[in-house]
Amino acid sequence: MPTTLVEVALPLPIPRTFTYQTDERVASGSRVLVPFARRTLIGWVTGETQGEPDTTRIRAVKRVLDPTPAVPADLMRLCAWIADYYLAPLGLVLRSALPAALSRPERSEPPIRTTRVLRLVAELPSLSQRDTVFRRAARQRELFELLEAMDGAAEVPHLTERLGFSTSVLNGLVDKGLARLDEKRVRRDPFAEMPRDVEVVPPLTAEQQAVVAPLLAAASRDAAAPKPFLLRGVTGSGKTRVYLELLDEVVRRQGRGAIVLVPEIALTPQTVARFRARFGDDIAVLHSALSDGERYDAWDALRQGRKRIAIGARSAVFAPVRDLGAIVVDEEHEGSYKQSEAPRYHAREVAVVRSTAAGAVCVLGSATPSLESWNNARTGKFELIELHERIGELGLPEVRVIDLREGRRDSDERERRTAQPGRRDRAPARGAPPVLSPPLVEAIAERLRRHEQTILLLNRRGYSTFVQCRGCGEVWACPDCNVSLTYHRGRRRLVCHYCLHEEAPPATCRRCGEEVVVYRGVGTEQVERTVAETFPDARVARMDIDTTSAKWSHHRILERFGAADIDILLGTQMIAKGLDFPNVTLVGVVNADVGINLPDFRATERTFQLLTQVAGRAGRGLRGGLVLVQTSLPRHYAIERSLSHDFVGFAERELEERRGPCYPPHCRLINVIVSGEDQKSVEDAIATVAHWTLSSIARDARAVTLIGPAPCPIDRIRGRWRWHFLLRSPNASPLGRVGRALLEDYPSLGGDLRLVLDRDPVSLL
Ligand code: ADP
Ligand code: ZN
């Protein structure tokens, strides 16, 4: 075959492909091993080189790794769209989209695991024949007859380790020409061994029926390309049941494939269990705790069509499902669908693009849709379907507010009496309200008496959220980040939640030498302690990043809670998602104000979503439910609207708030960030980048505005200073053009300076 030139995307932060030559035939989507500078990298062939290559010194492909493309054509196109829209190099997109095992140059073979199998190749029909052949070889005869009983084959480790046959017995059968040793591929599926719930399929309610009908119509083979659906269904309205019904049609009846995205798979074992109960081994669970090999096997099973449904978090949107018929995005408002490093894609948007390209049905579901999706439904870009009622004629739980400002005056009194050196970590800060107000304590006590369960939310981990000198006001901050350190009492350390820096808690103030250092701001660890002291007999479990680092640990806590081995489950936003426990009759929000004043235009929306979601965990059984919300801002609209479960009212108000100054969904943003170790260089660089951008957008000057530059709200992380500006436009394409020019034409910043473009950012911190 003559030499051809091919374009190869490499996993490097460089937004272009590279030209290589090869004598072999390689289809686009195949992986190749290529030399780059002094290294060897894995790249993906994107096609033959068109026109003249931009260099004369073209190096040769070292090895073609995939005879047939590793990446199916539809996924190649999807990744190309992501690279273009999210302003990221295609090689980085492909690396994110594929199992890690496929982009390791040092181990370029797929991690296939094999085992040896002993297989019968001859028969001995008559008994006398057996007697002759196995004279003085009783163990061989035993093995022969065992293999017959096992359908003619068994794995060697099973025979030797479990059943105690020696290798010489095995070899004896082989030498006699009765059996053969083969290699067999082992497919790892850790979920295959997990118990599966029994499938119970209650009939659809009338309301569910009404939203299922348009989904099935859209799924029918001869429907025109359907619009994406936004399913807004209050908590407990049975959205999962609706997804199952759609998948039944697409997978069972039509034999097509489907993808189900969940925000974080470890946190939603119940959702996963429902899909497994219904579809069993047709599902590949792309769990974050899978090993590289297990992940590869799940991916390969989908690509080969041996499994037809993929369920997983963000990156499952790239699952190589065949003949895609539906994508479900559960809890579509969740910020975790946006990747916070390059490529900074949003899985919900990718799901919409992928399903549109495939002619598949796309359902975005939530009780509290993102304002982007809500706006798309209002303007007719999405089709809105709604579930207004909870299953079983259960009402939404009653929500009451507890005004923390009222508890403050008494606590000032108490503090004057208790603050003393040596008990520092227990002294409440001035004006701090009690962790649990009397009405909340009383409500919990009542639940304990009635053997019902309580969920307590506080979206802040650690014991105290900052440490301050009473004398001079000094706050202990991370040496590398501009954030205060959190006191973790279990480890007796001050910890930075951004870079994980740790130090010992201070004995005296490092600035003024004063001894009175106070610990302020309550975190989950402190709630746990207060609960334990207030209810010594209660069984309490805490769920936050600090208690769930071990593999499957979320699962275990939730299992115990489901089995009623835990009376009170407390934790961060982790406990607000998707849990369905009918014995939970009380939800307490320890402090609803956490996060509401963050300098980010989505802070209010996030607060509303979190409160509404956690409230939705209460009252899922016949005994009803109560939600108590402690707050100092009872009149704030995010809190007021969540008390009345009024999503629509909240959304209307918040859409107004974002009109001037204009924020998404009314316009689109790119956050342009420059970071580096030297403060002055970063400040100079962002000014230069902003100036360059302004002059280069001449053509789009009216469509795109530049806001800033300014320091990022957290202006230093891991020793790097951070400045940013925003590019804003009502339209996607001029914004994309400006971003692309910046990405491709702006000269490298040099030194340790880094330029980041974050399109459709979910956080501006
Ligand atoms: P959501 O996801 O909307 O919060 P879920 O899917 O968790 O709601 O459903 C809430 C509860 O109602 C679950 O226990 C589920 O099994 C049950 N459920 C859903 N649909 C029905 C139905 N048609 N009949 C009876 N129970 C149902
Ligand atoms: Zn830090």
Image (tube, rainbow, N blue to C red):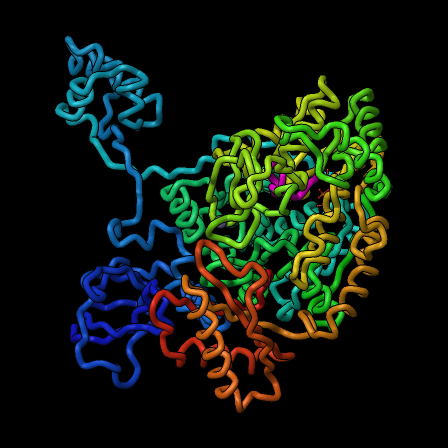
Instruction: Specify start and end residues of the magenta stretch as a single range.
Output: 457-467
Tell me which corner region of the image, top left, top right, bottom left or bottom right, holds residue 467: top right
Q: In the rendering, at what x and y percent does residue 143 appear?
A: 26, 17
Left or right of 232, for residue 39: left
Q: In the rendering, at what x and y percent does residue 724 appear?
A: 53, 69
Which of the two residues, 297 or 423, is positioned nearer the viewer here?
Answer: 423
Which of the two residues, 340 or 505, is positioned nearer the viewer here?
Answer: 505
Left or right of 753, for residue 612: right
Residue 499 drawn in magenta: no
Q: Is residue 742 above or below residue 33?
A: below
Q: Residue furthest bottom?
A: 699
Left or right of 16, for residue 167: left
Q: In the rendering, at what x and y percent does residue 140 appear?
A: 21, 15
Q: Going 26% across and 85% down the picture, which residue do you hit?
A: 52
Left or right of 463, for residue 403: right
Which of the two residues, 663 or 450, is positioned nearer the viewer here?
Answer: 663
Q: Going 61% across and 29% down the picture, which residue do you hit?
A: 559
The answer to whether one can see residue 693 in this image is: yes
